[in-house]
């Protein structure tokens, strides 16, 4: 990960970061990611970052459903490890 703080988006009020590992010809400085996308607690692989970028382009309800599944799997998995 090559993540750099960009600032707060005036329009949305959300904190944004630039992931320079995902730079492309259409966004040579890197991919802009919101705070929720980078608060995983570890460095993400390029494939994981690309998946998050893809997810961010979906409808909010779809994002909420996917995040709910991930959270549930994490909680369920944590209880089974004990």
Image (cartoon, rainbow, N blue to C red):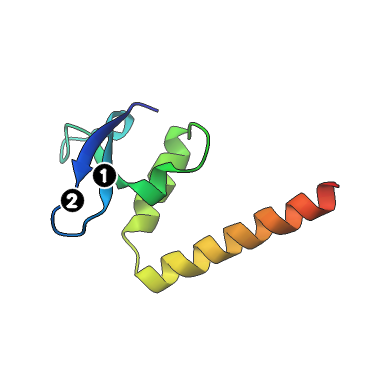
- Position of 24 compared to 37: left or right? left
Residue nearer the viewer, 48 or 43: 43
Q: Residues within 10 Å of mark 1 (few under 14, many from 20)?
A: some
Question: Viewed as shown, does residue 54 lie left or right of 70?
Answer: left
Q: Locate residue 59, reporting x and y percent.
A: 34, 70
Q: Secondary structure at mark 2?
A: loop
Instruction: Name the image quarter holding residue 68.
Output: bottom right
Q: Which mark is residue 16?
A: 1
Q: Which residue is mark 2?
A: 9
Disc nearer the start of the sequence (1/2) = 2
- Judged from this view, the residue extending furthest toward the right is 82
Q: Secondary structure at mark 1?
A: strand
In the depicted view, which residue is nearer to us: 20 or 15? 15
Residue 56 vertical placement versus 49 (above, below)? below
* Left or right, residue 15 beside residue 70: left
Residue sitting farthest toward the bottom: 61
At 80% from the left and 54% from the top, the residue drawn is 79
Q: How many marks?
A: 2
Do callouts 1 and 2 mark residues in contact (Cβ within 8 Å)? Answer: yes
Residue at x-position 48% and y-position 31%:
43
**Given the current orientation, which residue lies at the most extreme top position?**
2
Give the image location of residue 21, x and y in percent: 32, 29
Residue 23 in percent (x, y) is at 24, 33
Residue at the (51%, 61%) spot, across then down:
67
| CA neighbours of label 2 inside 10 A, class few (<14), some (14 to 19), many (20+) | few
**Quadrant (top left, top right, bottom left, bottom right) of the N terminus:** top left
Percent coordinates x, y for residue 36 in the rendering: 40, 51
Q: Residue 47 has which mark?
A: none
How far apart are the alpha carbons under marks 1 and 2?
Answer: 7 Å
Please name the residue shown 34% across and 56% down the image.
Answer: 56
Q: Quadrant of residue 47?
A: top left
């Amino acid at each position: 990960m090559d993540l750099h703080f960009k600032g707060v988006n005036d329009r949305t009020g959300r904190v944004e970061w630039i992931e320079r590992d995902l730079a492309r010809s259409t966004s040579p400085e890197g991919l802009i990611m919101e705070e929720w996308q980078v608060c995983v607690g570890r460095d993400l692989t390029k494939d994981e970052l690309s998946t998050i970028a893809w997810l961010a382009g979906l409808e909010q309800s779809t994002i909420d459903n996917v995040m709910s599944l991930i959270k549930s799997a994490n909680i369920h998995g944590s209880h089974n490890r004990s």
